[in-house]
């Protein structure tokens, strides 16, 4: 188990993620396809090339999804690893096209881009050391005891065989308190602004991602909950968002807040069981409507905040943390009554009467210039986990803290949607936000926070 300080500084990594070798000793039950995440390496993509590059990156994700489906259906190790060479052959021309698009637009493609075409077989825990138990060698996927009388597969997990497993859950009673926020200092800002936007009672779902894959249907390969802006899909422009309806009580907030749905893996199919983002992408089970959603903006412990620019885009966490590593992982799982204990890469088992809580602490420092960046990360940053200060050249902005509560049965049996090859791991959880506050309301948000007021 790895615990996380919810004020952690998720330092950005520009190194390709480590991956295991083609060992020939792992089987689909205990491993997954691990491909270098090309998008995280792109720091210099000219605006004129963004649309083309985003489309190519989405194509790479679709290739991995298709390859993983073959991989998961393989009967033995040889069949599983046979998907790797064709996948590399598919990836290489797409990656070359990405480099060409950047170069032709006047940008500088990163060195070694073509080397990122090679994918590997990686163990589900990222170590490369696990091997399948004997009962898996012939494809006979036996069930294991998940506790509380429930049964889960010992490795692949979940009702559809690709996660999570019993080891992905931990009893919250066995977690030590680990939340240690920085102390407020002179010049800090300790006010709050809470916006009420509902719990997605409207049932707005789609498997798009307008930030990472604009213009691409099913760009996320998993289903998202949406609150706030109701015009959000893969094709929504800034004008569409500005003119869209909102579920927020204050109509001056047309921001979009979205995150992967949480499903109860109880054998009951949702109506997307045969749809993109649902069953077609191995996201199976009954979508859970949150019991509560809190969207709060908070300040900085050492400085005042400046207003967020309109249409600022922020992603917190990493949907591909299983294969990328945890450099950008920022999931935070807990239980009501135990929120001084936060989990980074495990789901909590909550006691009777306690509910599951997901918390997303978004980046709270802005570069002062850009509303987005090529890798959707470098225009924003986390404040230092000890001092609370922003990195040099960055300004403190209101920090979005999303708290989502679910009333699900105690014990294993639920999971967030994910890219299929990410195996529904808790550490792949993530949240997305586009600021569409009107200027007057955003000014009030900053004033409330800087004056120490608690507003809504």
Image (tube, rainbow, N blue to C red):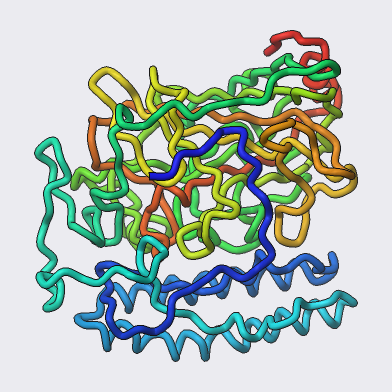
Point 46% across, 72% down: residue: 34
Q: Quadrant of the C terminus?
A: top right
State whether residue 139 is above or below residue 381.
below
Is 130 left, or right, of 425 in this rendering? left
State whether residue 173 is above or below residue 259.
above
Q: Quadrant of the N terminus?
A: top left
Is 277 left, or right, of 298 in this rendering? left
Point 25% across, 80% down: residue: 74
Closest to the observer: 354 or 195? 354
State whether residue 19 is above or below residue 360.
below
Point 73% across, 50% down: residue: 237
Q: Residue 238: percent from the left, percent from the top? A: 77, 46
Q: Residue 329: percent from the left, percent from the top? A: 55, 49
How many numbered discs sit on the rendered protein? Answer: 0
Point 65% across, 32% down: residue: 245
Task: Give the quadrant of residue 186.
Answer: top right
Task: Give the quadrant of residue 170.
Answer: top left
Q: Residue 300: percent from the left, percent from the top? A: 75, 25
Q: Residue 303: percent from the left, percent from the top? A: 83, 24
Is 43 left, or right, of 181 in this rendering? right
State whether residue 438 is above or below residue 35.
above
Closest to the observer: 114 or 433? 114
Closest to the observer: 246 or 224? 224
Residue that extends furthest to the top in the rendered view of this protein: 453
């Amino acid at each position: 188990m790895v615990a996380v300080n919810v004020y952690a500084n998720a330092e950005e990594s520009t190194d390709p993620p480590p991956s295991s070798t083609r060992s020939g000793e792992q089987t689909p039950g205990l491993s997954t396809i691990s491909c270098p995440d090309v998008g995280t390496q792109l720091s210099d993509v000219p605006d004129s090339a963004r649309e083309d590059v985003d489309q190519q990156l989405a194509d790479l994700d679709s290739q991995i999804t298709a390859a993983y489906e073959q991989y998961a259906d393989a009967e033995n190790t040889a069949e599983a690893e046979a998907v790797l060479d064709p996948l590399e052959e598919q990836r290489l021309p797409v990656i070359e096209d990405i480099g060409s698009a950047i170069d032709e637009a006047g940008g500088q493609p990163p060195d070694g881009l073509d080397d990122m075409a090679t994918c590997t077989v990686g163990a589900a825990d990222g170590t490369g050391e696990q091997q399948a138990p004997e009962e898996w060698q012939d494809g006979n996927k036996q069930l294991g005891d998940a506790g509380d009388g429930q049964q889960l597969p010992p490795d692949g997990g979940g009702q559809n065989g690709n996660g999570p497993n019993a080891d992905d859950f931990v009893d919250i009673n066995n977690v030590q308190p680990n939340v240690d926020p920085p102390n407020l200092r002179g010049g800090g800002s300790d006010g709050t602004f809470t916006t009420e936007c509902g719990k997605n009672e409207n049932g707005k779902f789609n498997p798009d991602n307008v930030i990472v894959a604009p213009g691409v249907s099913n760009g996320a390969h998993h289903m998202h909950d949406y609150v706030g802006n109701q015009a959000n899909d893969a094709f929504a422009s800034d004008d569409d968002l500005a003119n869209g309806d909102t579920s927020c009580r204050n109509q001056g907030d047309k921001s979009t807040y979205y995150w992967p749905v949480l499903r109860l893996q109880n054998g009951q199919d949702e109506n997307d069981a045969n749809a993109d983002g649902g069953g077609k992408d191995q996201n199976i089970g009954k979508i859970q409507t949150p019991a509560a959603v809190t969207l709060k903006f908070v300040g900085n412990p050492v400085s005042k905040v400046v207003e967020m620019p309109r249409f600022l885009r922020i992603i917190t966490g990493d949907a591909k943390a299983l294969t990328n590593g945890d450099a950008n992982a920022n999931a935070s799982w807990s239980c009501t009554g135990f929120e001084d204990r936060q989990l980074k890469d495990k789901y909590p088992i909550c006691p009777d009467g306690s509910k599951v809580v997901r918390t997303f602490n978004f980046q709270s420092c802005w570069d002062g210039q850009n509303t987005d960046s090529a890798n959707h990360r470098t225009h924003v940053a986390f404040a230092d986990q000890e001092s609370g200060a922003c990195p040099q050249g960055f300004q403190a902005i209101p920090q979005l803290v999303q708290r989502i509560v679910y009333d699900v049965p105690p014990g294993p049996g639920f999971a967030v949607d994910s890219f299929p090859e990410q195996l529904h791991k808790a550490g792949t959880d993530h949240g997305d936000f586009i600021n569409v506050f009107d200027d007057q309301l955003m000014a009030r948000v900053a004033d409330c926070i800087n004056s120490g007021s608690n507003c809504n």
